[in-house]
Amino acid sequence: MLLLNKDQVTNWLNKLMQTCQVFAPVKEGDYFCFKQISSCDQVILNYNNTRVPPKEVLFPRSEKLFCYRCENDGVQLTEQIDESKKIIIGLRPCDAKSLLLLDNVFSSDKYQDPYYLTRRNNTVLVGLGCNQPAGTCFCTSLGGSPFSTEGLDLLLVDIGDQYVVEVLTERGRALLSGMELPAADQEAQEAARMVKEGASLSSQVNLEGLKSRLDVNFYDPIWDLIHEKCLGCAACTYTCPTCHCFDIVDEAAGNEGCRIRNWDACMFPLFTLHGSGHNPRPTGKERFRQRVMHKFKYFVDNFNAIACVGCGRCIINCPVNLDIREVLAEIQGSEVRSDNQ
Amino acid sequence: MKNPYLPLLMRLVKNFVETEDKLIHTFTLEFLNEEDEKSFQYLPGQFAEVSVFDVGEAPFGIASSPTEPGHLKFSVAKVGVVTTALHQLPEGTILGVRGPLGNSYPIEEFKGKNLVVIGGGFAFTTLRSLVTYILHPQHRGDFGKLTVIYGARNPGLLLYKDELAEWEKRPDIELVTTIDHPVEGWNGRVGFVPAVTKEVAPSAENAYVVVCGPPIMIKFTLPVLEELGFPPERIIMSLENRMKCGIGMCGRCNVGNKYVCKDGPVFTRAQLNQLPNEY
């Protein structure tokens, strides 16, 4: 463990910016978001969490897959793969964990997504522990914690005027080269321990038995009730660090254009609408069920992990206060019945 | 890292009006690059994402058979933005193709077995691929008796009429075509596919059945197949769901935890019985 004075941070980031794109939390309107910074003045590290998760650094909400140009006797394709070196500074442990989950999606036995994976391999993650988790946080219910190091290269623990720096990987260590940071002394280590102990979460979700319940309740009448409040606005999916659905479209101009992928959401009716007019998920009920099932059952079936990190963004951003913690509790509390179609 | 989003370039060499209502066209595409053709190794039942540049991509079952080298065929109904654009394309246009995608019909399992192929309407595209593959002189001996039951509303809506006529003449395939209502000059059967299947009563002994068609046809054909003694493990179906990426990432074609694009589109009825009815 090393010790980084807060007044050294500017110097450190300036150094990093010379060789890499540095993404850090900045304030935009009433919210925080991860942006590529050009000056350290913008960076705010005493923030709670960003509205949109840092997954967008690796999986942008809109990105070019390739450009094409139609010529007399052919079409020229130009791949658009971003190979720049990146550092994300100050991401929360829950968001770091979400990237480990997304890795499963973008890299399968058969197919690798070169856009995500190239950025992922070129990005170093510097986490920031959560001294004061929000009331909507429930990471500990999902195997995370406010100071989890999972998936991170460095973890910063704020102990007042200094950060205790936990070096977790060689890539993380390399970011500190030339800084000549002292080792954290007994006092600093004790301070870090106190901070960690003091970071308690007020909210818990009982996930015991949830998966086996979801295994059999696809046709349960509970879905008729649970979704009623939902407007289908997809704020939950756009702010979710593990949601990965996307659309692919062509944007044309004259005889050339680009193929673009944009974030999309399972909460929208057009998402699954067939050309024939048939829609396998025709109403809010099926779409809401899909969202819950995908995170808490299908993802578990496929990757042996729940696709939720307990960041609470879907709770904060829902315009009708639909709370996933309550939804899961309702499912847990519903009468057990075996499925029949 | 191979980029699964980059299409291969192909030239549209034929835009053929397949049905008398003109709503189905069959597109024949040739590879622009020889190495692309070598890399495109497919089996009947697989599909590809076809791009019309400036308009977008859509997934279509491959109607040609790997035994017909040099080109790919797709039979496409005009229903949406991409398909409407496709229908209007002049021959010679350069298109993009990504694939082959998805699994295929379980050809290896079919070997040494009798095969019943049941199709309805324009869902005969990958079935054409399958039948053509089996009828190829190099393959025919690997399979037992081949029975094909194919129905459409009227004779003009049957796909691949010239080939049906040729199959009719062959001794190594039993072809039964049917239409919904009698029409003058029609020599095939009259009646819906489920009823005709019951009449033809193909034996389930040592046999697999492949069924593709509109949902209503599937719904009434399945009980007939059950009566005939086909176990769910030997009833093969192919699903369609809206797709974008075709490689299990964009999240829209799932049925339960399976992605139709990556885990399908071909499933046995036994597999579908384990999945929610969301297709």
Image (cartoon, coloured by chain):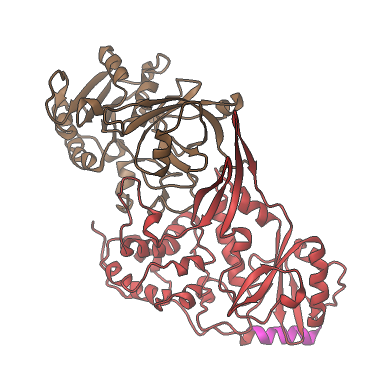
Chain colours: A red, B brown
Residue toward you, B197 or A235: A235
**Left or right position of B65 against A16:** left
- How far from the left and from the top, in percent, is residue A223? 30, 67
Q: Which stretch did the figure color magenta? A: A185-196
Res. A296 image quadrant: bottom left
**Left or right position of B21 against A169:** left
- How far from the left and from the top, in percent, is residue A268? 39, 60
Image point (64%, 44%), residue name: A79
Image point (24%, 20%), residue name: B175
Image point (54%, 52%), residue name: A261
Magenta highlight on residue A191: yes
Residue B205 appears anywhere in the view? no
Magenta highlight on residue A165: no
Res. A257 image quadrant: top right
**Left or right position of B114 against B29:** left
- How far from the left and from the top, in percent, is residue A46? 67, 82
Residue toward you, B55 or B175: B55
Q: Does A339 appear above or below A74? A: below
Q: Quadrant of the C terminus of chain A?
A: bottom left
- How far from the left and from the top, in percent, is residue A63? 59, 54
Residue toward you, B108 or B196: B196
